[in-house]
Amino acid sequence: MKNAWWKILTVVLLLYVLIAGFLNEVPHLPILNESIRNTYFHVPMWFGMIILLGVSVVYAIKYLRTPTLRNDIISMEAAQIGLLFGVLGMITGMGWARITWGEYWSNDPKQNASAIGLLMYFAYFVLRGSFVDHQQRARISAVYNIFAYAALIPLLFILPRLTDSLHPGNGGNPGFGTYDMDSNMRKVFYPAVIGWTLLGIWILNVKSRFEILRQKLYENV
Amino acid sequence: MFKKWALLVCLLLSLLVANVSVAQSESTVMVEANAGAQEVEMADKLRSDGKIYVVVGCVLVVLVGMIIYLVAIDKKISRLEKQYKS
């Protein structure tokens, strides 16, 4: 817990988000009503997922340059936590869609694309599990990781914008300003994104330190 | 190494915050456009009853519990790391 300023920042931001997220003033919009506050919890999950998967792909490339155990473990753990964030984002999104779009799953382009994206990352773990040899597993899954991330970006950010989507900011001219957010909401939304993402990085920190320690112990036994 | 990542995330997202001022002008237009829909039903009753504080308190208990758990694991691993080095 040394040099833990960012861990303290995480706690402070998340406490602020939970308190202000329920109590601050939000725009009164039809259909959305109070559920607009989901913006502080559902959307940061996807931000967190993209950033954690980004960390994963960076460490995959680092592994290919310098094949150390550490790079492989961080790459794998980051993909795992990114996937957790994605699944949480999917579940919270489905709940939100039920009351605003009418159905849990309305085959919205962005819903479908994110489902495909998550499946690609499930396949990453299937691939990892199918090797006995450590080095082979690390190398081939690092290469797959790069392809998966490169495919994920157009799936989530480009293809849904080419067609009509129920998601705000899609279908037509996308942009952050078109979200139904006012400056009051942004005061909570940005801290929420930073806070939830840092929580993911904290979990990644703990998990990969544990895994590195475990591997070192196995080597010495 | 993780500190570097944390710093990077903070920097990246402060860029997003810079977006606020730009997006602000657009969103005021949005809010004005919705000014006619002031009668939209919100959970004002829940708020005036003060029952919303029960919800906030409940969620806070969950978050604080989770964080205490995470801190405990973090410390345990730090201790193991120290033991391993010595």
Image (cartoon, coloured by chain):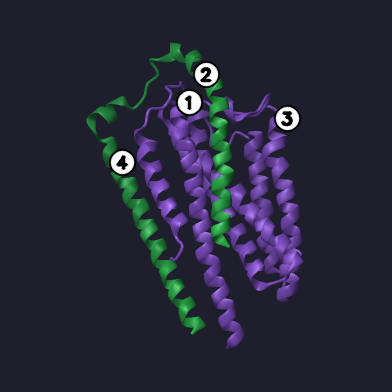
Mark toward the viewer: 3 or 2: 2
Kindly identify the residue that appears in the image at 34 percent across and 57 percent down. Answer: B65
Kindly identify the residue that appears in the image at 66 percent across and 67 percent down. Answer: A71
State the image quarter where residue A107 is shown.
top right
Please say whether residue A62 is visible from this viewpoint: yes
Mark 3 surroundings within 10 Å by alpha-carbon count, few (fewer than 14), some (14 through 19), many (20 or more): some
Q: Which residue does the numbered mark 3 point to in the structure image?
A: A162
The amino acid on which the numbered mark 4 sits, given as a three-letter code, is Val
Q: Position of residue A17 (x, y in %)?
A: 41, 42
State the image quarter where residue A29 is shown.
top left
Colour of the chain lettered A: purple
**Chain ID of residue with mark 1:** A
Q: Which residue does the numbered mark 2 point to in the structure image?
A: B30
Q: Which residue does the numbered mark 1 point to in the structure image?
A: A182
Same chain for mark 4 and mark 3? The answer is: no
Indicate whether A20 appears above or below A212: above
The kind of secondary structure element at disc 2 is helix
